[in-house]
Amino acid sequence: MARYILKRFSLMIVTLLVIITATFFLMHSLPGTPLKNEEKLSPELRAQILEQYGLDKPAYVQYFKFVGHLVQGDLGKSLNYDGREVTDMLMQGFGPSLLIGSQALLFGVLIGLILGVLAALKRNTWLDSLATGASIMGVSIPSFVLAALLAYFVGVKLGWLPATGYDTYSATIMPSFALSFAVIAQISRYVRTEMVEVLEQDYMRTAKAKGINRFAILVRHALRNALIPAITVMGPLAVNIITGSLVVEGIFAIPGMGKMFVESILNNDYTVIMGTTIFYSVLIVVTLFIVDLLYGIIDPRIRITGAKE
Amino acid sequence: MSKILDVRDLHVSFHTYSGEVKAVRGVSFDVEKGQTLAIVGESGCGKSVTSQAIMKLILTPPGEYKHGEVLYNGKDLVKMSEKEMEQIRGKEIAMIFQDPMTSLNPTMTVGKQIVEGIIKHQKLSKAEAKEKAIEMLKLVGIPSPESRFTQYPHQFSGGMRQRAMIAIALSCNPNVLIADEPTTALDVTIQAQIMDLMKDLQARLGTSIILITHDLGVVAETADRVVVMYAGKVVESGTINEIFAEPRHPYTWGLMNSMPKLNQDRSEELSPIPGAPPDLLAPPKGCAFAARCKYAMKICQEVDPELTEHSKDHRVACWLEHPMAEAYRKEVVEGRESV
């Protein structure tokens, strides 16, 4: 097991390095510089500013300098917001995204799970059709369309919840809900399909023959076996949602990571782009790793295979 | 001897897209305390459905209990609610399934799967239940039961899994044990061990056993009484001696003939019963076996024979039993013996 973890860990580092390198050079090939109102600057002043930030050097020199700082945990300062540390900005932006994202995830997984199980139990009834319909809608309606509709009807027309901002807790409800829709859709589909299969397994009959009641059989024997594929999608889904949806945060004016990322690209804010990219990548890679470990906990057969490697 | 289980005229059907499949069409038999009843017949004759119907493990829908009673100590299980059945399953009647490879939950330790039933039925604490479970593992002959307790099914061999299944089934001292082809998935030496184990436990605990199998060798060794099923019906039933020494139904003859004999030359082919069982979506009007029966008469195609008493215990459903067919029967039997 220790060898397996070590192997996975070194692979993670390699993956991250590839992502960092690719992003760095792609970013530098974007037209424009981080400078604002570039055309108004005199050539001398422009050269002076570029030199001050080390932007006059060739890209590969900048790259090695950046990696050198990164290894020491220094992501540098924002080029756009004067003098602000990228690490601080990330932490600040991650807060709202994490809160809204976790709410969306928690709600989405819970409802998705219940819906999936019910659909499997009441297969080919109106409930099953309803769940199928809901999940097709959830997958095909983009979250920003739902977000806009929610903001307009619930926020503006009915005035039940604040349409924008991040001042009160109630402001987080609508964005969370908008994000959770896709989660409900995906989780319920996976759980239903797998549950239908698990319910027909021989060991379900064995459990019933022991005199265990229906609910306990469902929770103890069926759900755990049905969760394995759902766990696979849950990892990337969680990262996506927790790091904040770019557009949904834009619609509800949430000062989160998503908004920060979009702004930094528009401004060519090199250090912030790199910072956010690294942050996203680390989250994804680590989550996938956790998912792999979770497999082992849920399905003992996978644990053994992992150990043999 | 008293009857612990009495199945009366049981009918079970399955509703499928192509129509109603009448899997069990009027099965009656009884099991006496401490005895072993064997149900034999080829695949698809309704043995497994009958056994699962006794514990009401048939899912409804698509299954349906059309008619009949399953009396356990005089109480009809068919009429019982699910809540009441939970008190019967595992505690009064337990079951061992055919395939030990798929009948255990792969994501739960073997120990937990045994403990589960014990806690449900015996109201023991977790620690006491664990002790009892380890005792059961020891009883069924699993070495180092303490460490086996925390292992998962995939760490067990096929024979060990079937032993674990037996441990689960016997953990609450059931009065009736239904074993649905408990040894088909195992190799011959393990088969013998498992059968010996069941006999041994029966002697010690006084359990009644319903053994479902198509292995007549196993039947001859273990059973007290035999029920022969064909196409969802009982065609012959009797004590072990009656069935083996004096089988009366042509289907039972066919089963006996298709067994390899010790004095048989190895190059000699086995003699199977030609043809296949009828489609139970539309069972034939007359005797279900008529189409495959060498001795079928005109009436066999037209009217289904009733189960008639040959002697006190020996019942046969065949037109050859009819007084009017006595002469023909004699001819048939003489012809069989001369071969």
Image (cartoon, rainbow, N blue to C red):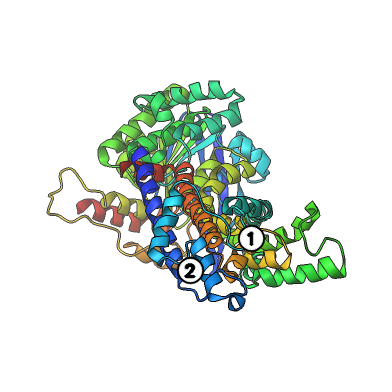
The answer to which of B175 and A101 lies nearer the viewer is A101
Residue type, numbered disc 2: Met
Rendering quarter of residue A301 = top left
- Circle count: 2
Element type at marker 1?
loop
The extreme front residue here reads A44
Q: Work out how far the residue at label 2 is from the one at label 1, CA to CA, in angstroms.
A: 19 Å
Can residue A30 be seen here? The reply is yes
The answer to which of A109 and B10 lies nearer the viewer is A109
Q: Chain of mark 2?
A: A
Q: Which residue is mark 2?
A: A27
The answer to which of B200 and B299 lies nearer the viewer is B200
In the rendering, at what x and y percent does residue A293 appear? Answer: 45, 45
> In the drawing, what numbered circle is on residue B253?
none
In the rendering, at what x and y percent does residue B167 appear? Answer: 44, 31
Residue type, numbered disc 1: Tyr
Q: Are marks 2 and 1 in contact (CB under 8 Å)?
A: no
Q: Which residue is mark 1?
A: A81
Q: Give me the residue at 39% from left, 29% from top.
A: B148
B110 versus A187 height, above or below: above
Element type at marker 2?
helix
Can residue B307 be seen here? The reply is no
User: Mark 2 against mark 1, which lies toward the viewer?
Assistant: 1
Position of B25 with respect to B321 (left or right) is right
Q: Chain of mark 1?
A: A
Which one is earlier in the sequence, the residue at label 2 or at label 1?
2
Q: Give me the residue at 29% from left, 35% from top.
A: B192
Q: Callout 1 environment at 10 Å: few (<14), some (14 to 19), or many (20+)? A: few
